[in-house]
Image (cartoon, helix red, strand yellow):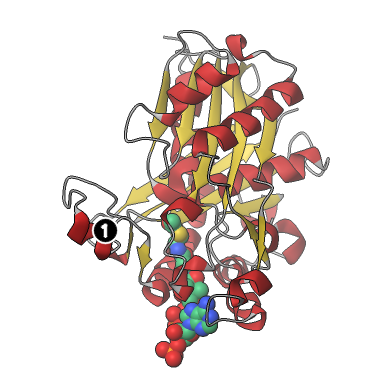
Amino acid sequence: MSFTGVKIVGVGHYAPARVVTNHDLEQWLDTSDEWITTRTGMKRRHWASNDEATSDLAAAAASAALVHAGLQAQQIDCFIVATVTPDYYFPATACLVASRLGAVDKPAFDVAIACSGFIYGLTVAAGLVRSGVYRRIMLIGAETLSKILDKDDRSTAILFGDGAGAVILERSDEDSFLAADLGADGSRPELLFAQGSGARRPLDHAALDEKVHLIHMQGPETFKLAVNRMIESTEAVLEQAKLAKSEITFLIPHQANKRIIDAAARYLGMPNGKVVINIAEYGNTSAASIPMALSEVVRAGLVKSGDVLVFVAFGGGLSWGAVAWRWHQ
Ligand code: ACO
């Protein structure tokens, strides 16, 4: 098995048409635009319609990435979808997306690690390309978190949105992958979880009445852990890559809360212009947030060859991670 380099040759993103503003939420929740804006940085989020599922969003983002790269779906060797809101328990959402795009008989699988999904997926996908297993991989972070939100719980209903971001990784002489730092701690799942109809608590009428299928989060505790883990993971990945903080062109963090991002960025000494934040428009889209933000800055022409990008996330699991990536056109 020969080791090569990997680079991203196409990006795309998609958000459902329906926009829910803070003022919309005020209509049925005891909340305010002022509270949501100051506590989270969020102004709007996009929620899927009743007949839109995660694979629909994922396919739209992936199609945009294919056009951006000038490729056909059949030229992709493997499809990975990072999501915790799959269309079904099984089959994997990635199988549905690959077929929808017209890719025949290609391998496809999901990565289910909540907000860290894109970081884990990127590490796996880059490894598969660099080790020579596949030439091109489509990696998509896609979520319809609105489908598992308790719309009457003001502490979570305001936070989450739907969307998808896609990247196409391709074998290359130049190597974009610099380092990865991944971690997980499953000892306190109740800090942030949706039990769904999982084997621990199969769905019955009582479970439905208790809303176990919806997101439950202990916000303040999660907040503190998120700040600390995102700082530690960024520092760890920089150390592995032998990079100084000043060498980062863009820090692209998971968009969970603007105060989490600001606190981490302040500690890391990152000036405002180097931290990519689009939380006002999309809210927290879990595994989709980083590839959506990446797609936006790349398509805006802000990322140049040689730039160093650091992706960092924290979320359910608990899980966290960072990837350092040198951009090659
Ligand atoms: N509107 C008005 N008041 C509210 C709202 C709301 N939407 N939500 C909560 N409050 C109230 C609370 O009831 C509380 O009132 P009390 O003092 O009378 O009891 C008060 O505001 C303060 O509540 P806190 O929960 O302490 O507020 P905090 O400043 O911590 O913000 C938040 C809450 C936004 C949830 C924050 O804790 C947070 O962002 N946590 C981390 C989220 C995160 O990072 N998740 C991980 C990634 S997500 C994933 O993996 C799927």
* Viewer-nearest residue: 131 or 102: 102
Q: Circle 1 is placed at which residue position?
A: 208
Viewport quadrant of the N terminus: top left
Residue 301 is left or right of residue 45, and the answer is right
Furthest-right residue in this view: 301
Instruction: State the residue at coordinates (43%, 72%).
Output: 153
Residue type at the position of mark 1: Leu
The mark total stands at 1
Image height of 190 relative to 166, above or below: below
* Viewer-nearest residue: 42 or 196: 196
Image height of 4 relative to 290, above or below: above
Residue 44 placement (x, y as % from top left): 67, 63
Residue 22 placement (x, y as % from top left): 65, 71
Residue 95 placement (x, y as % from top left): 44, 22
Q: Is mark 1 within 8 Å of ligand 1?
A: no
Q: Secondary structure at mark 1?
A: helix
Instruction: State the residue at coordinates (41%, 73%).
Output: 219
Residue 231 is left or right of residue 175, and the answer is left
Viewport quadrant of the C terminus: top right
Q: Residues within 10 Å of mark 1 (few under 14, many from 20)?
A: some
Instruction: State the residue at coordinates (66%, 82%).
Output: 34
Image height of 220 relative to 92, above or below: below
The answer to whether residue 127 is visible is: no
Image height of 235 relative to 295, above or below: below
The answer to whether residue 18 is visible is: yes
Residue 254 is left or right of residue 105, and the answer is right
Residue 263 placement (x, y as % from top left): 57, 72
